[in-house]
Amino acid sequence: MEQVDLVEEIEAEYTLETPVKCGQCNKQMHSVNVIRLLRTKVNFTSSLPRRGYVVCCPDCRSIVPAGLG
Ligand SMILES: [Zn+2]
C-alpha cells in the first residue's frame, strides 16, 4: 500500500452549524472534512458517477453520514 499524506487529501472542510458527536471517537465535531473519490477502475457498462466524495470526522477520519447539496 502506498503511503499518502493525509493532509493533502482533504478537498474541503465544512463547519457544522451545530456541533455533533462522532460515533467513532466520541469527540464533538465542529466541522467535517470532505474527501473526493476519484474513479480509477470501472466496468464499461457502469452508470456509476465518475466522481464522489466521503465525509469524515477530522479527528479520527471515520466516515460520517452526511450529504452535500
Ligand atoms: Zn471521530
Image (cartoon, rainbow, N blue to C red):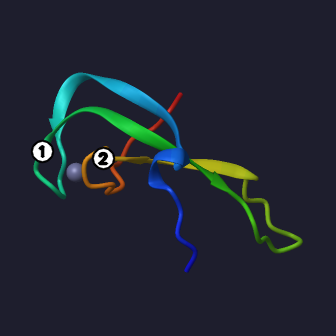
Residue depicted at x 53% and y 28%: 69
Mark 2 Cβ and ligand 1 under 8 Å apart: yes
Q: Quadrant of the N terminus?
A: bottom right
What residue is drawn where x is 46% and y is 47%?
A: 7
| Residue 11: image location, x then y, percent | 55, 38
Q: Which residue is denoted by mark 2 in the rendering?
A: 57
User: For the point 40% across and 27% down, which residue is it?
Assistant: 14
Instruction: Report which residue position mark 1 lands on.
Output: 27
Against 38, is 17 above or below?
above
Compared across the picture, whether 2 is left or right of 16 comes to right
* Type of amino acid at the residue the image marks with label 1: Lys
Q: CA distance from mark 2 to mark 1?
A: 9 Å
Q: How many marks?
A: 2
Image position of 33 with respect to 51: above or below:
above
Q: Which mark is residue 62?
A: none
Q: Residue at x 39, y 41 (%)?
A: 66
Secondary element under disc 2, as helix, strand or loop, is: loop
Q: Residue furthest right?
A: 44
Residue 28 position within the rendered picture, expressed as x and y whole percent measured from the top left: 13, 38
Tell me where residue 40 sits by quadrant. bottom right
Would you say 10 lies left or right of 14 here?
right
Give how far across and how far down residue 3 sits, in percent. Answer: 52, 70
Ligand 1 closer than 8 Å to the CB at disc 1?
yes
Pointer 2 or 1: first along the chain: 1
Residue 31: percent from the left, percent from the top? 30, 31
Label 2 Cα neighbours within 10 Å, binned few <14 / some 14-19 / many ≥20: many
Amino acid at the residue labelled 2: Cys
Label 2 with label 1: CB-CB less than 8 Å: yes
User: Which residue extends farthest top?
Assistant: 17
Mark 1 neighbour class, 10 Å CA radius: few under 14, some 14 to 19, many 20 or more? some
Secondary structure beneath label 1? loop
